[in-house]
Each structure stands twice: as C-alpha cells, then as structure tokens.
Image: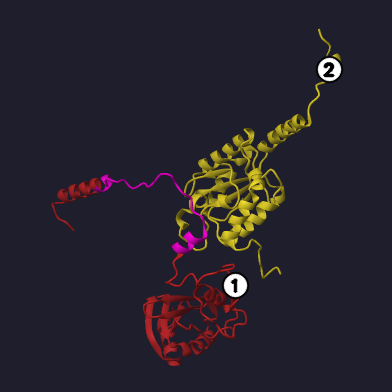
Amino acid sequence: MMNSINNVELVNNLVNKTIEVLKYEVIDKYQVAYEVEKRDVHHLLITLKSQGWKQLSYLSAVDWIADNEFEVVYILFNWDKPVHIQIRARIDRENPVMETILPIFPGAKYYEREVHEFFGIAFPGNPDYQKQLILEGWDDIPPLRKDFDPQAYSDKKFPKREYPQDYSVTDPKNQRKAKRDARKERATSLRGGKTQ
Amino acid sequence: MKSTKFTPRTILSNKEIDRKWWEIGDFFRRNSLWLLMYCTGCCAIELPPAMTSAYDMERLGMGPMATPRQADILLVSGYLSLKTLRRLIYTYEQMSEPRYVVGLGSCTINGGIYHDSHAVINQLDQYIPVDVYVAGCMPNTEAVMNGFVDLIEQIKLKKANGWKKYHKNFDWYKKNQLDSLGEVIVHDEFHQ
C-alpha cells in the first residue's frame, strides 16, 4: 500500500459521507458490511459504483423469521481495491418489496429473479422478476423461507425407498462410545489426572 | 464319410432365427458399449480414473458417446433435481433400443444425503428403469468398473431388460413422472 490510509477506512469514509449507516461490521480486512435503510440502498450503490465498485458480485436475501423481516444483501466487488462491500437492508416480511437496481447494475436481472423465486421478494421495475428461473413449475411457498419444510415437501412429492429391515449403522449398545471414553480417561490419567 | 453336401438343411422357425440374431447382436453389443454420461452429481469424478489409464474402460470395449441416439448406456452419476430429471427422461426416450441405465451413488438409490431436499428426487427407478446400481457415496472406481462388468454379464444372461420393462409398464412410469414433475415438457425461455 502506498497511501497511509487503508482500504477499509477509505470505504468507511466514503460510505459515511454518503448516507447514514445503521450498523457497520468489518468481517476481515477484505470484507466490510453496512446495514442501511432500504431507501438509501440505491444512492449508496450509485456512489460506490462511481468510485470503482462496479461489479455486483452477488445479490441474495436472508430470512430473519423471528424479527419478521427479510434482509437483502448486495455484494460489490472492485477490480482495483481488494475490498468486498456488503450492503444489507431489512425489509418487511409480510409484504416484501424492494425496488429494482436494474438501472444501476443491469446484471442484477437474474439475481432478482432468483431472489424472487426462493424468497418471494417482489422487485418492481424489473420487467420479468416473476418469471421462473431455476425451479420449474414450483407449487409451494418459496423454498428458502424458514417456515418451509423441505422434508415434508419431499415426503409428499417423491416416493421413498422402503427397506424391509433397518440398516442403521449406529451400534445399539454404544460400545464405541464406551471405548472412546475409556481411552480418554486413560489419556487423562497419564497426563497427571488433569481434566481440561 | 457323410458328405455335408447332402445334409438336409435345418428349417428354422422365425422365432429361432430371431433369437440367433439377438444372440449375435448381444455379443457385439456387450463388447462395445457406448456410454452417455449424464454427469449430474459428484459421482462423475469417478469417471476420469475409470476412463483413463488407471482402470481403462476401453479394455471392456466401453467408450464415451456424445449423443443419446448412438449410445447404449445412460450413466446417471449422482443426484437428480426435478429440472435434471425432465431432461433425463427426454434423453432416455431419445436413445435407441436396447438401452441400459446405470445409476451411480446412493443418491439414485434412496436420495442419499439429499433425501430431504425440496429439489432432489429420491428414487430413480420410479421414473426410468435401472439395470445396475452402484452403491456408495461416492462409489470406489473399482466398484464402478465392477458395475460395468455386472452389466455386461447381465446382457449376456439376458437379464438387462430395463428397456422392455419401460415398454411394458409405460403407464406406471409416466404416472410417477407426472406425479413428481407435474409435467415432463421442458419450458426453456432461452430456446423458445
């Protein structure tokens, strides 16, 4: 590095100058995350894009079911500075709507379709966010929501092989565990009886 | 010595002639099997050692083939999502008969580690008939080769009848396909 200020601080200054940050997290020296208001996302993305973070690496969502919120995550990548920037915004879970970022990053078209498919978040402004992308003919609630039960769906939809006998490999008497415990005890006694 | 010139010709029935031709056909077929490798899952990593000099599939007369219409074996290596299964059924129905299916790994048998996934089917033989399963997650390359030898043996003993089963129980297979997939037709926005 030639300059005295490091990349993370540089990003930090830039972001704090642009908008109000709710939460800030340095994941490591190559990754920083900012939680911002939903309405600030576009402004921040435009600013960062003009400063060199011109590639949208990823766009996804997280389902925080306890808070009744979705978190949309944008990851930006810069080809000159080794810092990935995550921008997170919380949106309502009952009526999940996030305005599209298509005018800023045209490549987000497919990411938004994917997020809509797996979380059910609407992206007004993206002309075909409702089209199916990965799942074909999906007939249930979006599968990456936390209240979706994949086991129940699988049981309902796909026939299972039935075995006449149980071929489970765990030993019923737990003999291995007893042996392992005995070995551990012996090792401890050899070490002078100290248990860690 | 009896001259062969005057030996009466044996009149074979059509059925017998047919059987003999099948015998000959099976002999050549089992010694030059062409694989269509449908590498859907991680078991596909066992194929490079099986194909190259380590185990050398070619000594059994087996080789890779690019198109379904010229292939004899459909090799399903690993888990199948609903999306892949649609394409797999297309591929299977394109293959010329007799056609054989080899399933690699526990995913094709009972779903393997993806047994509770919303996207992955559990049992391949509900949708298309399978002649040989190779168990394991993932199977050893020796096991894969052993599976191929088993298939050759089955063709020799006329037990590899999966494709006949598909004709016979076509309605049953179609019903299972429709139950799990909804529809088998592939809608592809990039090619329409």
Shown colour of chain A: red
The N terminus of chain B lies in which quarter of the figure?
A: top right
Q: Which chain is yellow?
A: B
Q: Is residue B87 visible?
A: yes
**Vertical side of A36 occupied by B190: above or below:** above
Q: Nearer the viewer, residue B65 or A145?
A: A145
At label 1, the amino acid type is Gln
For the residue labelled by badge 1, is the local secondary structure a helix, a strand or a loop? loop
Residue at (52, 81) in percent of width and height:
A53
Q: Position of residue B162 (x, y in %)?
A: 62, 44
**Vertical side of A158 occupied by A68: above or below:** below
Q: Is residue A6 visible?
A: no
A177 on left or right of A143:
left
Circle 2 marks a residue in which chain? B
On residue B120, the disc is: none
Residue under label 2: B8
The stretch of residues the image draws in magenta is: A151-177
Residue at (67, 70) in percent of width and height:
B189
- Cα separation between marks 1 and 2: 71 Å
Circle 1 or circle 2, nearest the eye: 2
Q: Nearer the viewer, residue B24 or B176?
A: B176
**Vertical side of B24 occupied by A169: above or below:** below
